[in-house]
Image (spheres, rainbow, N blue to C red):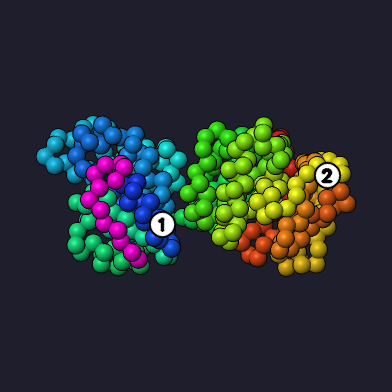
Amino acid sequence: MAIFDDYGHHPVEIAAVLRAARAAASGKVIAVVQPHRYSRLQSLFESFAGCFNDADAVIVADVYPAGETPIAGVDKQALAAAINAHGHRHAVVLPSPTSSPASCAGSPGRATMSSASAPAASPSGPTRCQSSWRAGGCGMMQKAALALRHVAFEDVGVWAATLDAEGYDLAYVDVGLRRLPLDRIQACDLLIVLGAPIGVYETEAYPFLIEEIAAIERRLAARRPTLGVCLGAQLMAAALGARVAPGPGKEIGYAPVELVPAAKASPLAAIEGLNVLHWHGDAFDLPSGAERLAATTLCPNQAFRLGDWALALQFHSRRTLTRSNPG
């Protein structure tokens, strides 16, 4: 575990430290921050809430008063809540001054601990952090699943329970409403790219597709776990250089897909012979280097995979038959 210690009082300084930690780290980046002075936290509250985007987890200690009287509503709980409200997936408070920040973050595997506002870190801090990390403590830091959502009704559906059972903390990004969080797209443990009634090639009408395809291309090139559904599968194919265009006809309704022999040793073996939802008119060519897993008469490329890190599904397998909107 590497530790970056910086006496950073200002959000700009904290953001710079975390960017450096993210560039240097091979694992997760855990930010430990002790705000310095109530008045500074109050005056720069929104900036503090938004400066931790390069951290996988944020642990907020008690405000260091520096002789100031506490200000109501300006404390570690308020800051942690604001960080989460700004879209961060895991910001927690340090329960007490004697608690170990490492035990609050759980077991991250390879990690970088980045401390801001140095009163929170003493010279003996690294040793305490390492021993408490192994021992566990006040919480387990979950793996991060990030879903790129293009329309409000298109969520992960029944997969949410599976993701939770497998220890994933699921967050959504509503694509097209704001700039894509490119760092989070690359850093998350699992990226899920959801569907929408638009075409990959409609970049003039939906210019965000250009940046989204580029982000998916970078993630796939890094062999980071990625799952695409319908439009998401088409975006993955486009990111890999394959053609995506209107198919010979629309597939709408429930019907099984035909699994190729190799798919019977893949996750798709669980859906063999079962009806899945088809809701598309476009189709993709099989990307170079990808393995085809499933087909239908109208759509010969219903699913493909790359190694054990990428899976693309033209169909929807995550919806129950009782859902009112097929998505």
Q: Which residues are magenta?
A: 1-13
Can residue 308 be seen from the camera position used here? yes
Residue in the picture at 52% in, 41% down: 180
Whether 257 is drawn above or below 326: the answer is below
Label 1 – label 2 distance at C-alpha: 42 Å
The secondary element bearing badge 2 is classed as strand
Residue position marked by numbered label 2 in the rendering = 247
The secondary element bearing badge 1 is classed as helix
Q: Position of residue 109 (x, y in %)?
A: 43, 65
Give the amino acid at mark 2: Gly
Can residue 253 be seen from the camera position used here? no
Precedes in sequence: disc 1 or disc 2: 1
Towards the viewer: 268 or 45: 45
Q: Quadrant of the N terminus?
A: bottom left
- Residue 224 is inside the magenta segment: no
Badge number at residue 147: none
Whether 18 is drawn above or below 130: the answer is above
Residue position marked by numbered label 1 in the rendering = 23
Residue in the picture at 42% in, 37% down: 85
Residue in the picture at 73% in, 68% down: 265
- Residue 3 is inside the magenta segment: yes
Give the amino acid at mark 1: Ala
Q: Position of residue 92 (x, y in %)?
A: 35, 47
Whether the residues at callouts 1 and 2 have beta carbons within 8 Å, the answer is: no
Residue in the picture at 14% in, 42% down: 66
Horizontal placement of 216 versus 69: left or right?
A: right
Q: Position of residue 64 (x, y in %)?
A: 19, 44
Q: Position of residue 106 (x, y in %)?
A: 39, 59
